[in-house]
Amino acid sequence: MAEVKNKQVLLRDYVCGYPKESDMYVTTTSTLNLKLPQGSIGVLVKNLYLSCDPYMRNRMKKLLDPTYYAESFKPNSPISGFGVAEVLESGDLKFKEGDLVWGITGWEQYSVINATKSVFKIHDTDVPLSYYAGILGMPGMTAYAGFYELCSPKKGEYVFVSAASGAVGQLVGQFAKLLGCYVVGSAGTKEKVDLLKNKFGYDEAFNYKEEADLDAALKRYFPEGIDIYFENVGGKMLDAVLLNMRLNARIAVCGMISQYNLEYPEGVHNLMNLITKQARLQGFVVTNYYHLYPKFLEFILPSIKQGKIVYVEDVVQGLENAPAALVGLFLGRNVGKQIVAISHE
Amino acid sequence: MAEVKNKQVLLRDYVCGYPKESDMYVTTTSTLNLKLPQGSIGVLVKNLYLSCDPYMRNRMKKLLDPTYYAESFKPNSPISGFGVAEVLESGDLKFKEGDLVWGITGWEQYSVINATKSVFKIHDTDVPLSYYAGILGMPGMTAYAGFYELCSPKKGEYVFVSAASGAVGQLVGQFAKLLGCYVVGSAGTKEKVDLLKNKFGYDEAFNYKEEADLDAALKRYFPEGIDIYFENVGGKMLDAVLLNMRLNARIAVCGMISQYNLEYPEGVHNLMNLITKQARLQGFVVTNYYHLYPKFLEFILPSIKQGKIVYVEDVVQGLENAPAALVGLFLGRNVGKQIVAISHE
């Protein structure tokens, strides 16, 4: 029975404010038998890619609400999140040795995943494997469900996406263009704005950090107003969008990354416009839409292979660099989907 | 051709902050021929009851958005709003002399209504005629559409209504009880709280002015959280509700009366809970639901006659008292639906 060192990224303690690299630490003191315990119905996996996602910020807090969709990370325990892995041994009949899978795993070289209902088997390896932590995984499904299911988009509608070059945003913009919408995105650097226009096909894009007046910026790009807003940032941007909605506007609330590190979230002042514009603001969590995953793959895999949809990833190598990658997400350092590759460790 | 004096309530000028009686004035200098102009397709009516509604506050401002659902009142012109009237002469084949109607009319003794598409003929006079300015008119339809169409209520759900004894709120609470929901209402005086519990059948009710911590108040009445919130007030109450939503909560945004007189609306801080609770916040305007009016009458008329639904009105007499009645609405002076009776003038 092979006993191996298992390099891990652990949370040091619950986090206040912006997360820092020092809120996590990497150890190699843990060892693991590369064998499932007798009678286990889980899977033993070797992790290949880990996904850095904004929702993880919440898990770094002490969460008290038992109905919350995710649990707190435990101090001095490995962080967990979405990832791509190879099955080394399986106690679940759905999986066998050598299978590639994606789902919730640990930030470590090897994991025993007991909750296999949130693990998906990978069938198509004709695409980069890391895509299953992004476009073909949770972020892809998030863009798909949030845009198509919540926003009921129609050809010709005016669509705005914030954090528009991120893991989810870059896809929403492309989905909207495929449908024949007019699409504008916001992002936080010139490089990202260029990506939006030149790589993802957004009609227009702007750097929100260079706009003193977000309301004026939106009026410039949407003189007729906004039908659909895919909300990734919250705060002042949401307030500006509320001033620029068209009748029957739909806002899918996917995330509010500008608020996650504040002790007290900013106030949003323009909600009265929901009445006059008969508009809808709807939050969602992707896990409720996983039943659509097969349908999503049928749509997205050919679109990728035919080059109709592209995906930009920001890949860092090695578990040692995972804390910096996760922290960077909240500073907008990533360009595209932030991935940690650990397949060679 | 009879020429009569036509007593009117006029707006003095656009209003900032809380409206005052002096923002309006009553005159009898206007005269009117009690005859429609040759070729008119409108109706000449004698007004009987006028309705004071919170949405009228917006019309006292200079509204600049042409897509807005209502227009500004014009300074030195009569205020307009919902009312009940008797047809004296009709140029529209749908109406004839002697018909009773409800719809948008002027704050004056006699009006010529040209926009007859927003005028409804009254067929059932077996109920108080003033009801057509309340439970059987716009506020009734608002409660009906907002609760049944937007909130998709189910038996046993936890329902919260703010401004719960108002023209709309008192009906929403009763609709929810008829359906077998648990219903709590908030209001601003002990008298109103007593009405909620003893007259409208709310399970619980509280005076929001006596609650230093609205979040704590809601947690007291909804230890399991809120499924449906019928939003009439906005601001701090909305913020507290956002902290107490159950999964898949629905908030129908009917009005935000606490915000109408502020120069800059208060900030709402807890919108992130929309994501984690996969909740929906949806604004609406009742005019889009008037196609349901016949269905609504089929439900509500027997309910009234069988005593299953009650309605409390606050009736003042005379056009002279209309400005005070309208102003009082924003100070919570009315108990139940605020009506101005002018039938005897």
Image: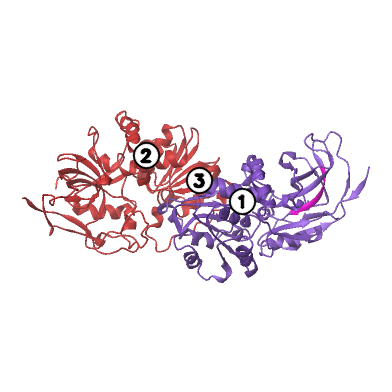
Chain colours: A purple, B red
Left or right relative to B116: residue A64: right
Whether pointer 1 and pointer 2 mark residues with C-beta atoms closer than 8 Å, the reply is no
Q: Which quadrant of the view contains residue A177?
A: bottom right
Q: Which residues are magenta?
A: A44-50
- Tag nearer the camera, 1 or 3: 1
- Give the percent coordinates (x, y) of residue A92: 79, 35
Task: Classify 10 Å Cα crowding around label 3: few (below 14), some (14-19), many (20 and above).
Answer: many
Alpha carbon distance from label 1 to label 2: 39 Å
Q: Chain of mark 1?
A: A
Precedes in sequence: disc 3 or disc 2: 2
Q: Which residue is mark 1?
A: A143
Residue A63 in view here? no
- Tag nearer the camera, 3 or 2: 2
Q: Which residue is mark 2?
A: B171
Q: Amino acid at mark 3?
A: Leu
- Give the percent coordinates (x, y) of residue B339: 26, 46
Identify the secondary structure beneath mark 3. helix
Q: Chain of mark 3?
A: B
Q: Nearer the viewer, residue B336 or A247?
A: A247
Q: Nearer the viewer, residue A337 or B76?
A: A337
Residue A318 in view here? yes
Q: Which residue is mark 3?
A: B218
